[in-house]
């Protein structure tokens, strides 16, 4: 993440800076996901036990993750439009090296978060969506760097940043809708007679 901020600043690439911002939200969301998962205790049969509300905590963490993604998408879109209005010089070689490092890191994390049953834990699904968004950001930054190095056409950087923002927005919307429904469906179980 720090490498992408430095690389994005040195190269002038929004795609790298946006990917670093997304990685920052990922770090926070993964911390939330880890904390929620640690509070959920399973017995030898895989059933959840422990203090009331553990499953709800996982759903709340997924909801917070989706809101963080929405904020990130808004920032990327705003900055991309500004860069289209006022193009900035971009150093493609630096951008490419940093983008490839980010791509390798994201593939490794996505591998760690793989699951045989993606529906089993909404919280892990949220974390995977964050990392997938980062992976898409790294792919976009790599493509943009190659185009800039080949042709010098710098608008590719904010244009691909907008495309990545749209892809992240779609995933965020799905997760927001799913976690909101789960939270809403649990409201009736909280009432005391």
Image (cartoon, grey):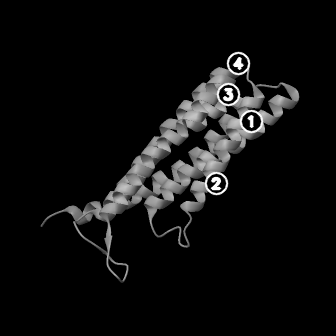
Q: Residue 156: x percent and y percent?
A: 76, 31
Location of mark 4 (residue): 88
First-in-chain label (2 vs 1): 1
> Marks 3 and 2, how far apart in space?
21 Å
Q: Residues within 10 Å of mark 2 (few under 14, many from 20)?
A: some
First-in-chain label (3 vs 4): 3
Above or below, comparing residue 141 to residue 103 in the picture: above
Q: Residue 11: x percent and y percent?
A: 69, 25
Above or below, comparing residue 44 to residue 57 in the picture: below
Location of mark 3 (residue): 13
Location of mark 2 (residue): 107
Location of mark 1 (residue): 96
Is 136 on the left or on the right of 78, as rendered? right
Which label lies toward us, 2 or 4? 2
First-in-chain label (2 vs 4): 4
Which label lies toward us, 3 or 2? 2
């Amino acid at each position: 993440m720090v490498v992408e901020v430095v690389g994005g600043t040195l190269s002038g690439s929004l795609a790298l800076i946006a990917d670093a911002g997304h990685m920052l939200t990922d770090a926070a969301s993964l911390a939330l996901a880890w904390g929620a998962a640690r509070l959920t205790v399973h017995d030898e049969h895989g059933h959840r036990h422990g203090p009331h509300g553990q499953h709800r905590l996982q759903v709340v963490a997924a909801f917070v993750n989706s809101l963080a993604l929405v904020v990130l998408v808004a920032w990327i879109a705003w900055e991309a439009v500004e860069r289209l209005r006022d193009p900035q010089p971009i150093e493609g070689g630096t951008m490419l090296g940093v983008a490839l490092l980010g791509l390798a890191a994201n593939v490794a994390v996505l591998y760690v978060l793989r699951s045989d049953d993606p529906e089993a834990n909404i919280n892990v699904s949220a974390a995977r969506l964050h990392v997938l968004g980062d992976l898409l950001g790294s792919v976009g930054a790599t493509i943009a760097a190659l185009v800039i190095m080949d042709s010098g056409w710098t608008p590719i950087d904010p244009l691909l940043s907008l495309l990545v923002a749209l892809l992240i927005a779609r995933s965020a919307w799905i997760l927001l809708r799913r976690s909101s429904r789960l939270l809403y469906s649990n409201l009736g179980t909280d009432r005391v007679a």
